[in-house]
């Protein structure tokens, strides 16, 4: 029998019979679960309707009202109240209220609550972000979350794995966001449907954790069940100072079986832009410099980490946002917010006439803090550009990395960072 993939190994250690092979149906023990202010109220309603009286483990559940926080209206305030009341009733320590709350997919790794080797489920599709730590992490529906809250278990069909090997050396201004946009552009938004996307190669091994999170965050945009990177010394350095409990590193076996293997040399890859209305609709930034924009969004669970803000600040320093453009900055967590402030990044942003938001998902899902009007066009470091994603159905969203976003904010059109830095 062939060896096991990373996905198979993690699931095997979380099943009672200790074996998980692609195609198997397994019931897996869950290490951590969570919901947000959009999804958790449905899970809580289902939990109570089922007559449940206790959480499987209060230390393994988080409630994170990050989508509409600070509350934008009465409806969103009531949603958060459902979470707050439930957290108090069941003594949940990981309810993250305003001042503590961050964008969930940046907050949970930062807090050391999701860890290598874990099985993690969240009622949010971008839960696959934590695959960057070497965790089997995937989004589930709110009713599945309710079942996990009661039992600590969930069933999966073990996904087949596709391996993506990136060779070469990344050029300047190219990062994890560009790697995943390139991948989606090659295979399409359904090219990894219910598969485990395993990222490997010399380029991946050299990536920072921030870039790894960005890469795995958008595995769902290719239809994947999970995105995975085998943990290594870079992972260890990130995790060891944060971990709230023991963790374990897994690697795929050398003779593991993959459905497909893609190998790409990305040494000449340009920063990429995904045009409306799908993440697979990619173009190099040099093919997009004739497109004027109305709004730039730098942040989100994809690119709201400190490293992303530093890149944006490097480009915006000493410059002004174009008078036709609104530039919105979203630090992903309070810790990132405070560190960016200490480093002087906020002064750079405000001098450039950008606006800094508290940590929130905000406009990414058309929530608040920057909704688009009819006919407006945004360039964003977010992860989706579907019709109406950021506001009016007749608006447009283009996706890019933080360097492209910052340069474009200065020039008022989609721009290569070198256009601004070489001035």
Image: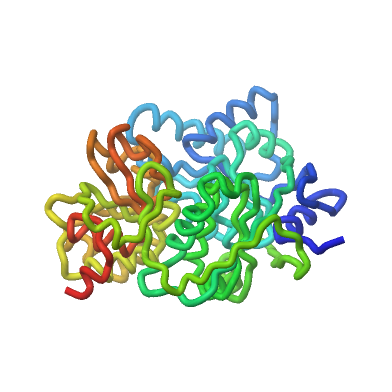
Position above or below: 366 against 108: above
Q: Quadrant of the C terminus?
A: bottom left
Q: How many marks?
A: 0
The residue shown at (69%, 31%) is 53
The residue shown at (34%, 43%) is 363
Residue 113: x and y in percent read 59, 56
Quarter of the view holding residue 392: top left
The residue shown at (47%, 54%) is 185
State whether residue 115 appears in this view. no
Residue 398: x and y in percent read 33, 49
Position above or below: 262 against 359: below
The residue shown at (47%, 62%) is 179
Residue 172: x and y in percent read 37, 74
Instruction: Work out whether residue 337 or residue 266 is closer to the camera in this orientation and state it.
Output: 266
State whether residue 155 appears in this view. yes
Residue 280: x and y in percent read 45, 49
Left or right? Give the position of 30 relative to 137: right
Q: Quadrant of the N terminus?
A: bottom right
């Amino acid at each position: 029998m062939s060896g096991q993939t990373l996905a198979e190994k993690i699931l095997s250690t979380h099943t009672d019979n200790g074996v998980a092979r692609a195609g198997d149906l397994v019931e897996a023990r869950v290490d951590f679960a969570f919901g947000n202010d959009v999804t958790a109220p449905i899970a809580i309603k289902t939990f109570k309707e089922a007559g449940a009286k206790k959480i499987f483990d209060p230390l393994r559940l988080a409630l994170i009202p990050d989508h509409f926080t600070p509350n934008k209206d009465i409806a969103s305030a009531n949603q958060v109240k459902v979470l707050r009341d439930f957290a108090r009733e069941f003594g949940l320590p990981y309810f993250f209220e305003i001042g503590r709350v961050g964008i969930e997919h940046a907050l949970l790794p930062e807090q050391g609550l999701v860890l290598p080797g874990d099985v993690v489920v969240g009622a949010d599709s971008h839960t696959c972000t934590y695959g960057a730590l070497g965790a089997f992490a995937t989004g589930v529906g709110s009713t599945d979350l309710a079942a996990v809250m009661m039992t600590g278990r969930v069933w999966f069909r073990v996904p087949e794995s596709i391996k993506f090997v990136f060779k070469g050396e990344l050029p300047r201004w190219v990062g994890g966001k560009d790697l995943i946009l390139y991948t989606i552009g090659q295979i399409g938004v359904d090219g990894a449907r219910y598969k485990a996307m395993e990222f490997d190669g010399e380029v991946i091994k050299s990536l920072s954790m921030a870039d790894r999170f960005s890469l795995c965050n958008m595995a769902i945009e290719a239809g994947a069940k999970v995105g995975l990177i085998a943990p290594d010394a870079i992972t260890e350095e990130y995790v060891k100072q944060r971990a709230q409990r023991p963790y374990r590193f897994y690697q795929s076996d050398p003779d593991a079986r993959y459905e497909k293997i893609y190998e790409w040399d990305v040494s000449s890859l340009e920063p990429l832009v995904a045009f409306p209305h799908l993440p697979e609709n990619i173009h190099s930034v040099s093919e997009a410099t004739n497109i004027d924009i109305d709004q730039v969004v730098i942040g989100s669970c994809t690119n709201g980490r400190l490293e992303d803000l530093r890149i944006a600040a490097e480009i915006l320093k000493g410059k002004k946002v174009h008078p036709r453009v609104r530039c919105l900055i979203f630090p992903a967590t309070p810790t990132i917010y405070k560190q960016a402030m200490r480093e002087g990044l906020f002064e750079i942003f405000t001098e450039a006439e950008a606006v800094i938001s508290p940590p929130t998902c905000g406009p990414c899902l058309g929530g608040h803090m920057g909704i688009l009007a009819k006919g407006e066009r945004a360039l964003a470091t977010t992860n989706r550009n579907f019709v109406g994603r950021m506001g009016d159905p007749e608006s447009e969203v283009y996706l890019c990395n933080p360097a492209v976003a910052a340069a474009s904010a200065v020039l008022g059109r989609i721009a290569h960072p070198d256009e601004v830095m070489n001035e």
